[in-house]
Amino acid sequence: MDLKIGDRIEMKKQHPCGSRVFELLRVGMDFKIRCEGCGREVMAPRKKIEKNIKKVL
């Protein structure tokens, strides 16, 4: 999957705050994403994030 820093992605599952939209802050073996709803930043393995992406906005 071709993703770049700054892309906005919609996930299959929502964040606890209710938002499904995240912004990519770091791309590599791990992804760092920021929730558009509450601003929380999360780092997760690439495989887990790519599996849970619904669409790129």
Image (cartoon, rainbow, N blue to C red):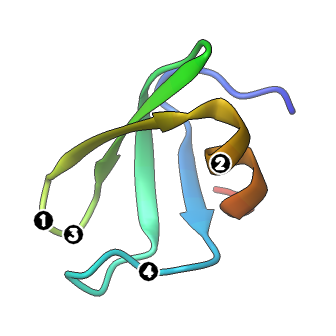
Disc 1 to disc 3: CB gap under 8 Å: yes
Q: Quick one: SS at disc 3?
A: loop
Mark 2 to mark 3: distance in Å?
21 Å
* Cα–Cα gap, marks 4 and 2: 14 Å
Q: CA distance from mark 1 to mark 3?
A: 4 Å
Residue for badge 2: 48
Of the two numbered discs 2 and 1 on the same chain, state the one appearing first in sequence. Answer: 1
Disc number placed over residue 37 in the picture, else none = 3
- Badge 1 marks a residue whose secondary structure is loop
Q: Which mark is residue 38?
A: 1
Q: Is residue 34 left or right of residue 27?
A: left
Mark nearest the camera among 4 and 1 is: 4
| Residue 53 falls in image quadrant | bottom right
Judging depth in this view, the residue of 31 and 7 nearest the camera is 31
Residue 47 position within the rendered picture, expressed as x and y whole percent measured from the top left = 72, 39
Tell me the kind of residue under disc 4: Gln
Q: Which residue is mark 4?
A: 14
Q: Which amino acid, by three-letter code, is at mark 2? A: Lys
Say which residue appears at 58% left-offset and 65% top-offset. 10
The amino acid type found where label 3 is placed reads Gly
Q: How many marks?
A: 4
Query: Is residue 55 shown to the viewer in this render?
Result: no
Residue at the image point whose x is 28% and y is 57% from the top:
35
**CA gap, disc 4 and disc 3:** 10 Å
Q: Mark 1 belongs to which amino acid?
A: Cys
Measure the alpha-carbon separation of dots 4 and 1.
Answer: 12 Å
Label 4 CA crowd tier, 10 Å (few <14, some 14–19, many 20+): few
